[in-house]
Image (cartoon, helix red, strand yellow):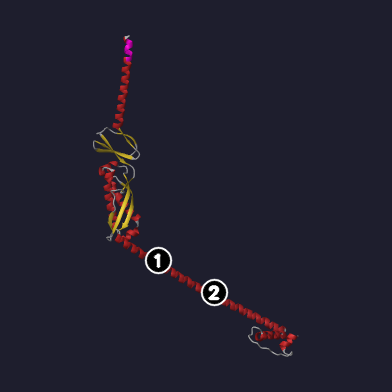
Amino acid sequence: MSTNENLPKRKRITSYRVNLFGFITLILLAITYFGFTFQVHESEQAAVYRMGKPLRNVTEAGLHFRLPYPFNEVKKVTKKIYLQGVGSGSKARDILTADKKTLVFDDFRLVQVPGNPIKFIQTVKSVRGSADKIDRIVGSQVRNTIGEYKLSKVIDAGREQILRTITSKSRKQLSPFGIELVMERINRLDFTPSIKQSVVGRMQAERQQEAAGIRADGEKQARLITSNADRERTVLISTAKKQALQILGKADGEAARIYAAAYENNAEFYAFYEGLNTAMLTLGPDSGTDVKLLMSGNEGLLKGLLQ
């Protein structure tokens, strides 16, 4: 009976030992996971420190090994491209041009930490701490770049050329801090009221000058076209008159030839035809006269009609 009574007790002890072993195993696994590994997401990168000194950069996502704190410390930095220069802390700058004209310049930019979080953390500590550094460096390049241009050149050069220069120079100065300037953009480039008035006047004068030049070119072209048209008209009229005279000359010659042939073939008929023409010119309805002639039957014209 005693042996049978001890069996449930032994089972309870065995079960307790199994549960305790499982619990200890879970604790060890948790300590191993949280103490000896760390997770890096796709949008992150990490800097690993050993006893406060930088050890390595981790830029690939996944599960990575480390020693427990304080032997290893992991600091994470975003890998995303983030917007900087827009918000309550941003403000427009007053920039002087080379001819001492004041412009109002407001900008923003896209920034990234390109794979060296240790350098980034050592120099600027964090993304928030990098804002002042970026703003000072980019602002300095904005003042220097625009300060190289006169006001008229700022207008003529255009925003893209100015931005390319600012971006190139700022990118070189930000590189030692582990920061990459991906893109610089102008939010507002405006003139003070006094400068704006002078710029508007200058642009109006330029457009008026341009319009006057276009009108002058148009008038020149119009005179040239009119001159060419008059010359062609004169040539055409002269050629037409020449051709008309040639045709009339040929017609008169042909008429004279026909008259001569008619006279040679029948002199009496020719004389009769000429008499009729003379009568029509002097007595016809188009002669403008009201003359009546009394002619005897022996007259040549009347005689020819009576025959």
**Residue 173, image x and y in percent?**
28, 49
Tell me how far mark 1 sits from mark 2, CA to CA: 37 Å
Which segment did they paint magenta?
A: 3-8
Secondary structure of residue under mark 2: helix
* Of 267 and 112, the residue lying toward us: 112
Neighbour class for label 1 at 10 Å: few (<14), some, many (≥20)?
few
Q: Position of residue 39 (x, y in %)?
A: 32, 35
110 to the left or right of 216: left
Give the residue pinned by disc 1.
211
Q: Which residue lies under the disc numbered 2?
A: 236
Please indicate, yes or no, whether residue 150 appears anywhere in the rendered image: no
Q: Is residue 140 left or right of residue 208?
A: left
- The dot on residue 9 is none
Q: Is residue 7 magenta?
A: yes
Residue located farthest toward the right when viewing the structure as drawn = 307
Residue sticking out furthest to the front: 290
Label 2 environment density (alpha carbons within 10 Å; few <14, some 14–19, many ≥20): few
Residue type at mark 1 is Ala
- Residue sitting at x 55%, y 75%: 239
Q: Viewer-proximal residue, 241 or 285?
A: 285
**Screen quadrant of the N terminus:** top left
Q: Position of residue 164 (x, y in %)?
A: 33, 53
Residue ID at (38%, 64%) = 207
Q: Whole-percent x and y of residue 82?
A: 33, 45
> Which part of the image, by quadrant, shows the C terminus?
bottom right
Overall secondary structure of the magenta section? helix
Q: Which residue sits at x=32%, y=39%?
A: 45
Residue 280 belongs to magenta span = no
